[in-house]
Image (cartoon, rainbow, N blue to C red):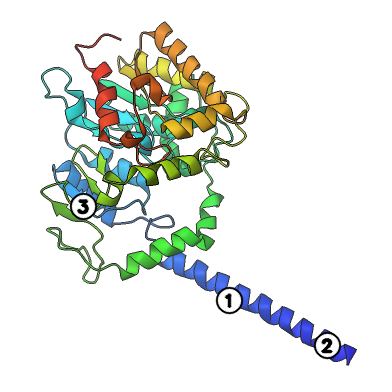
Amino acid sequence: MHMKKVSDQKEWFLKTILFMFILLSTTGIFNYAIDSAGIFSQNDELQEVAHALINDKTIGGLVFNYDERQFQKLIIENSGKKFNIIFVGSSKGMELRQRYLRFGDGSQRFFNHGMSGSTLEDYMAIIGLYESRSSLPSKIIIGVDPWIFNKNNGQSRWKSIGKYYKNILGKIYGTKVEVDLSDNLKYLQLLNLEYTQANLEAITKKNKQTNLEATTKNKQIKFYITNTTEVDDFTREPDGSIHYPFKVRFQKDLKTQRSAKEYGNAPVYSLESFNELSNTKLFEDFITYLQKKNIEVMFLLPPYHPIAYSLLVKDPKYKIIMDVEIYLRNIASTRGIKITGSYDPVNYHFSSIDFTDGMHSKDIVMEKLCEKLRDDTSQ
């Protein structure tokens, strides 16, 4: 009797292992085959989107399930027009628009290269891309998030365009610099629940009306051209800036406050194990390189939601973000760099209704912060 029980338990264990193996294998194969974000292969549809934006079209329906770095690369490589002003930074600055800047007579072209979780490596890679095309901008607005000085920020998405980061390092230091561009972490996406859900949505989502033709007969269109941003969808303007769906744009403040409280409690996005400021020398050497190229550098510090910021600075694990701001203001002062914004929303009288969650703001925030960057505004 005892032997039979042991045998049954062993059989159950083996069947469970086999079931888990089949489940994980099937999930991995599914995610690799669908690959809606183009993590494992080039997403050809991004070429169409880039072409549309470059030709001054507004795009709707394109969510963030694609390689944002490769998308920026396509924009830079295929644009026949020079961008005089660019923004580099994270999703916190994606609502910065050309009409908020109004530099000079307004003829200068602007493009927003904001990317989710952007880091110093991303900033440098974008400049490397422009350098490779001999089309460096005359002004660059850097949306500086605290986590770029955290060596433990966990960000590796920059490796998608990492060779351009490597090229800029070589130009800055005048010698070949070895950089590990292997990105084995991307294979974790094969078993990532969120990526599985994104891929499921990609194959079930109904085609929307579009003025763009698919490049293959049965291709699923996930974006469309629109004449207005007043649609209940993700939209992207020709300057690269984005608009969120109505449920985000017109979200009730109580929901925003709940989201901010959740964000402000551990673990906090890219701020874990932030014990000291790192990358400061590289950051300063990069700024020096830009200024030697006669590029006007400007800093934009995107604020946190008031509730989130209060929670962060009260927690010894995260209050280092105040040191980051002090450091940036000192750099700006000594190098003659315009600086706008603050991680502390109180400094600009922003309230909860100006945000959508703990770290993302509404248009009014970017519009107000741009006031200090205009030609007729003193530092």
- Residue in the image at 47% along x and 19% along y: 325
Q: Amino acid at mark 1?
A: Ile
Gap in angstroms between the C-alphas marked 2 and 3: 60 Å
For disc 2, the marked residue is 5
Q: Nearer the viewer, mark 2 or mark 1?
A: 2
Q: Nearer the viewer, mark 1 or mark 3?
A: 3
Looking at the rendered structure, the number of numbered marks drawn on it comes to 3
Mark sitting on residue 22: 1
Image coordinates of residue 75 in percent, x first then y, are 26, 41
Q: Is residue 343 visible?
A: yes
- Residue in the image at 54% along x and 56% along y: 188
Gap in angstroms between the C-alphas marked 1 and 3: 38 Å
Q: Circle 1 — which element? A: helix
User: Is 358 above or below relative to 192?
Assistant: above
Mark sitting on residue 60: 3
Give the class, few, some or many, for how many residues have Cα within 10 Å of label 3's Cα (few <14, many ≥20): many
Q: Circle 3 — which element? A: strand
Q: Amino acid at mark 2?
A: Lys
In this rendering, position of residue 130 left or right of residue 59: right
Looking at the image, the residue that sits furthest to the bottom is 1
Q: Amino acid at mark 3?
A: Gly
Image coordinates of residue 367 in percent, x first then y, are 24, 28
Counting residues from the start of the chain, the first of labels 2 and 3 encountered is 2
Counting residues from the start of the chain, the first of labels 2 and 1 encountered is 2
Image coordinates of residue 88 in percent, x first then y, are 35, 31
